[in-house]
Image (cartoon, rainbow, N blue to C red):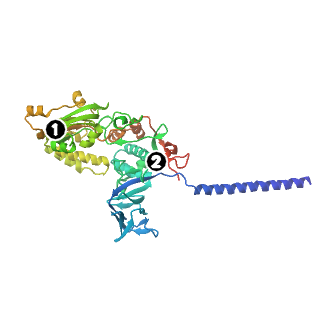
Amino acid sequence: MARGGTLKSLRLHVVRIASVVLAGLATATLLGSAQQAMPMEREPQMRVLLHEGPKLLLRADKAQWMQVRGFGGGVRRLQRLQLEEARGSVVAVLDGKRHRLASSTVLTVQNDDPRGIWLDSRRYRGEFQISCRGGQLRVVNALGIETYLTSVVGSEMPHHWPLAALKAQAVAARTYALRQRNRGGGWDVKATVASQVYQGVEAETASTRQAVADTRSLVLVHRGKLINAVFHSSSGGVTESSGMVWSKQLPYLVSVPDHDQHSPVHRWQERFASSGLRQRLPETGGVNRVDVTSRSASGRVRQARLEGPRGSLVLTGRELRQRLGLKSTLVTFEMVSADAAQPSRHSTLLARRTASSIGSRSRIDRITASVARSAISAPSPTTSFLVAPPPPPPVLSSPMRSRSFRFRASRFNKRRGLSVGGLQLLVRGQGYGHGVGMSQWGAHGLAEQGADFRTILSHYYRGAAVLPFQPHYDPALAWQPHPASGWWG
């Protein structure tokens, strides 16, 4: 009897255990299914403004089709889509047939072709979102950030540059892009130098894909936040502190020595004729005298006074650069005779050779080609600036000239017997860009010396750490908390 009771109790105990186990398995199954159904944290999507204008043309390659939503009646399969804004509405040409749409129409276009969709003369991956705003057709390209970066790296840097430099560019560009997300409006970044250059599929190469893949999800962080990872082409020997260019001094954007002495824009010069100066500076009617009244510690112009036949004008260095279209504000000024501006045959040939050697479409390659072409209209001394010069310190002429340039046209006329119309403003400068953050030519120089991408980034962004992205680095990006890294889902 006692034994029988014990066995019965044992059987009941086993049944209870089995029930608990089964219930646990069922719960785990349900939780697993629910977890799979929940949106996992995944690679962030970028919205890139590609186009704003009165008309546009989209097309697919060969036998591929675009899936277009927004016309009503489901998905339209098209090979060619032409849109044009017309008197408050949108005219669509769908494979040869015209349709008038309301200006509030929003279209989405995508396809399964890995080569992407053509927008005018370039191809892009991902999805197109098309809307009409203020009489302009707007095209926003939505795609994953890693795919976006494979094009950005190749658009910003020559793909044949050392891998360490390309990796540094990838991390800086990723950090910059993520910091711009969800800041308001219908897009995050532009495809131009206003944000960072993005030229679509043609800018992707094996080396840019490797640079992005090897740094997947890595960003620059300072005190738990994404940094403002700005960059520029070439500093001319020393980078600039952010507070000297913009309103705020950031602790990681300070002036540091650069390694860009081999850059074709390390040193340059430009001449401005009197007629051009009158057009650029109508308030003064040209330039008779330039006083640089303030420079930053790196030697860049902070403020200058320009005097001309009609009066004087005070400009900041940034305003002066915009007015004259200068490559940088690390400059000095001099009035010279127009007769000395004829280029030599050697400089013309060198410029043509340099321009014809450009094989890539990166922003830096276009700058290099532009500098080479400018040698055709520049005097022969600039030819030395198109080859790698020795690495001198970034000293601007003499101390007196670097402080200010003063020139009275009347005194020059008496001494040289020239009229004001026969003079030109000669600007000698160093570097290309605002000079803040990473110098791309400097990154190239450091990589050539054997530095890895972390060393390059730590040189230009002082005190910033290279870390896998975490949502709390930027509140605007905190989708779902997740302890892992490297993009999920």
Res 252 quadrant in image = top left
Asked where in the image residue 64 lies, by quadrant, the reply is bottom left
Judged from the image, the secondary structure of the residue bearing numbered disc 1 is loop
- The residue that appears at 54% across and 46% down in the rendered structure is 484
Q: Position of residue 482 (x, y in %)?
A: 55, 47
Label 1 and label 2: CA atoms lie apart by: 58 Å
> Residue 102: where, in percent of width, then height?
39, 65
Q: Residue at x 43, y 67 (%)?
A: 71
Q: Which residue is nearer to you in this view: 235 or 241?
A: 241
**Tally of numbered discs:** 2
What residue occupies the far left of the structure in this picture?
Answer: 417
Dot placed on the residue nearer the N-terminal end, 1 or 2 = 2
* Residue at horizontal 68 percent and vertical 57 percent from the top: 26
Observer-nearest residue: 392 or 93? 93
Report the disc number at residue 216: 2
Q: With respect to residue 373, does 133 lie above or below?
A: below
| Vertical arrangement, residue 293 with respect to residue 482, above or below | above
Instruction: State left or right for residue 23 relative to residue 135.
Output: right
Q: Residue at x 47, y 51 (%)?
A: 44
Q: Amino acid at mark 1?
A: Pro
Q: Residue 450, percent across and down?
A: 37, 38
Crowding at dot 1, Cα within 10 Å, few <14 / some 14-19 / many 20+, comes out as few
Q: Is residue 105 above or below residue 309?
A: below
Can the viewer see residue 229 in this picture? yes
Q: Quadrant of the N terminus?
A: bottom right
**In-image side of 19 versus 100 (left or right):** right
Tag 2 secondary structure: loop
Residue that lies at the very extreme toward the top in this rendered image: 399
Residue 309: numbered disc: 1
Residue type highlighted by circle 2:
Arg
487 to the left or right of 373: right
